[in-house]
Amino acid sequence: MPSYDSSRSRLRLADRHVRVIARLAAGETPDAELFPSLGELQELGLVGEEGQLSPLLRELVEALDAPVLTIGVEITGEAGPVHHGVVVGPNTVMVHEGWPGEEESEYIPVEPSTLVFELARMVHLRRGADEQPATPRVVSTMKALDAAFGVLAAPSGELDEDRGAVHTALSGAGTSAEAAAPLTELVLALNAYWRVTVAWDGEHDGAHAPMLRSLAVWDCGSRGYWIREQPEEPILPGQVTPESPLELVRSDAGEIWRKLTALIPEKGESGVRP
């Protein structure tokens, strides 16, 4: 069910509620399949009987009406994928954050100047990599990675045994001896892997064109951050095959911060830079 906290301008909404609000803001009638969601919003008082939108929705509606940037943050950890994001309007920035197993996300307005801070917080960016492997780059294939994850889908519960099984799976799938050892440690230490994608209406060859920038990172806890250079983002459906290369490059929190900042287009690229 949707809910709100007027003291902090916070809203808890599912995607279906947001679609209803966007339709009503555009002066359109929601599709019949969205009527139950409309009813929930009306019961809460966020939408009136005639489709009027509550003032509590003003900042969300402003951002949805004319988005300058949309940012998607997908984080996959032990609980599975969780989706967060940001909608940047001309004068409003709305952050939305999901929760594992929950349909609703929390929407809250933030100051434009804090955009990169918000992205860093969403991906839990932090310093510290006490046991980072010395090798700067690890190369394998997606087939080998799938084999390693297959081992961890049914772990033995004994770290040394799992380490040996992962190493064997990687080697058996064609990973070189040089790469198998560090990749084994990264797979075992993996807290989460995440991807941040920024989309905006840009210009290419003098014409308007949708533009994308992405950053994909492995968060391996004490083993540090590793930027996934291959498969290269953005990835199109069907583009990655078992034989696709996997390439991870060692990084740190400072470099990740700079790369998150670089995802945001300059004013001349998007019309507005927060």
Image: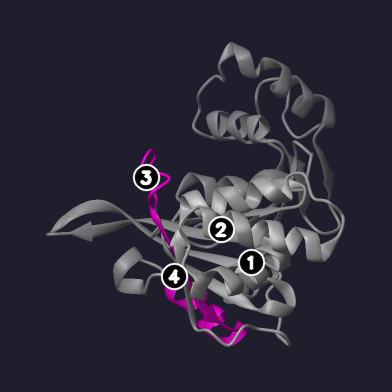
Whole-angstrom CA distance, mark 2 to mark 4, is 33 Å
- Residue ID for mark 2: 170
**Residue pointed to by mark 1:** 184
What residue does disc 4 label?
A: 263
Nearer-N-terminus badge (2/3): 2
Crowding near the residue tagged with mark 1, few <14, some 14–19, many ≥20 C-alpha atoms within 10 Å: many
Q: What stretch is highlighted in magenta?
A: 235-264
Q: Residue at x 73, y 74 (%)?
A: 221
**Residue 103 drawn at (x, y percent):** 75, 36
Residue in the image at 70% along x and 36% along y: 14
Mark 1 and mark 4: Cα distance apart in space: 30 Å
The answer to whether the residue labelled 2 contacts the one labelled 4, judged by CB atoms less than 8 Å apart, is: no
Residue 228 in magenta? no
Q: How far apart are marks 2 and 3 (CA)?
A: 25 Å
Mark 1 and mark 4 residues within 8 Å of each other at the beta carbon: no
Q: Around disc 3, counting alpha carbons within 10 Å, would you say few (fewer than 14), some (14 to 19), or many (20 or more)? A: few
Answer yes or no: is residue 121 visible.
yes
Q: Earlier in the sequence, mark 1 or mark 3?
A: 1
Residue 34 position within the rendered picture, expressed as x and y whole percent measured from the top left: 64, 19
Residue tagged 3: 236
The amino acid type found where label 2 is placed reads: Leu
Q: Do tag 1 and tag 2 residues touch (Cβ < 8 Å)?
A: yes
The amino acid sitting under disc 3 is: Leu
